[in-house]
Image: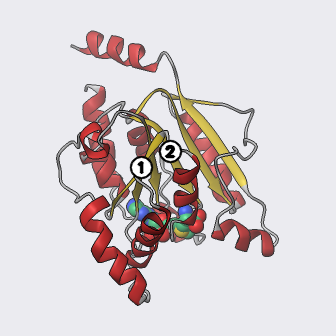
Amino acid sequence: MADGEAVERAGRAAHIRSFVLRQGRLSNAQQRYHQQMMARIGVAYRAAAVDLDLLFGRRAARILEIGFGMGETSAAIAAAHPENDYLGVEVHTPGVGSLCKLVAEMGLSNLRIVQHDAVEVLRDMLPPASLDGAHIFFPDPWPKTRHHKRRLLQPAFVELLASRLRAGGYIHCATDWEEYAQQMLAVLSADRLLENTAAAFAPRPAHRQPTRFEQRGLRLGHGVWDLLFRRRQDSLQAEDHRQDQLA
Ligand SMILES: C[S@@+](CC[C@H](N)C(=O)[O-])C[C@H]1O[C@@H](n2cnc3c(N)ncnc32)[C@H](O)[C@@H]1O
């Protein structure tokens, strides 16, 4: 089986959802900005590759963020790095409305939003080797054992995400849930396309400003663990070689 097929299968097999769509209260402002801004910066999900140069109107480093919550960190990072383009993916409408408001208020031109399941966005919209980085900050820890299957960071998902990175592109995860941090470390370390940039957990990279969840976790006395992996420089050639051998 070719690698592309393996990734395709992985994406489909991983389809236990990592979120539950809650109604949540949508403030008037969130609703208004959602309506106004998604027409400008929203990208509708469709099962076809998206042209990122066309989407952002330029060629720049492309960073995906999965599950941006209320989007404060996403907006702060995009404002601090106007040289990069950011694609935020979130399913929760109040969060999308909140980031729309920040984008409008801060006048950001380098951020686009897809309101959809990130697994499907990765699988269907983002071409292989199209991303320079991916951020997953404080993904839902699903603490009960019977819910662990809902965690986003599973081998099939990591394989799919790694395939969308260019060689040298990074995955940066953070969590305040120690046991999930250990799972992330094991799953990311086991992926053949990735290498750890640290001996185990990484110091918090400067681009990640503390999030709401982190601040809450710290108040509750939780630790915070950052993980910073890169797609191996030689992984694209190795994959080409494997495909040649399989052909
Ligand atoms: C615990 S919150 C963390 C939010 C934010 N990153 C922060 O640190 O404040 C996790 C977020 O991920 C979103 N999420 C979970 N699975 C997702 C998926 N498959 N696609 C898109 N968003 C997802 C949830 O809706 C939720 O808003």
Asked if one can make out residue 140 in the rendered structure from this viewpoint, the answer is: no
Asked if one can make out residue 96 in the rendered structure from this viewpoint, the answer is: yes
Q: Position of residue 244 (x, y in %)?
A: 27, 10
Residue at which label 2 appears: 82
As shown in the figure, which amino acid type bears the numbered disc 1?
Answer: Asn
Label 1: few (<14), some (14–19) or many (≥20) C-alpha neighbours in 10 Å? many
Q: Position of residue 46 (x, y in %)?
A: 18, 54
In the picture provided, is 175 more to the left or to the right than 105?
right
Q: Secondary structure at mark 1?
A: loop
Question: Would you identify the image quadrant in which residue 222 lies?
Answer: bottom right
Question: Which quadrant: the N terminus?
Answer: top left
Mark 2 within 8 Å of ligand 1, using the beta carbon: no
Q: Earlier in the sequence, mark 1 or mark 2?
A: 2
At a point 36% along the width and 62% down the height, the residue shown is: 16
Residue 23 shows which numbered tag? Answer: none
In the picture provided, is 62 more to the left or to the right than 42?
right
Q: Position of residue 192 (x, y in %)?
A: 50, 28
At a point 41% along the width and 44% down the height, the residue shown is: 156
As displayed, is residue 56 above or below residue 128?
Answer: below
As displayed, is residue 60 above or below residue 174?
Answer: above
At a point 51% along the width and 66% down the height, the residue shown is: 71
In the rendered structure, are the residues bearing label 1 and label 2 in contact, judged by CB atoms less than 8 Å apart? yes
Residue 110 shows which numbered tag? Answer: 1
In depth, the one of 121 and 114 nearer the eye is: 114
Q: Secondary structure at mark 2?
A: loop
As shown in the figure, which amino acid type bears the numbered disc 2?
Answer: Pro
Label 2: few (<14), some (14–19) or many (≥20) C-alpha neighbours in 10 Å? some
Using the numbered discs, state the Cα–Cα distance from disc 1 to disc 2 in whole angstroms.
Answer: 7 Å
Q: Position of residue 139 (x, y in %)?
A: 54, 61
Name of the residue lying farthest toward the right: 221
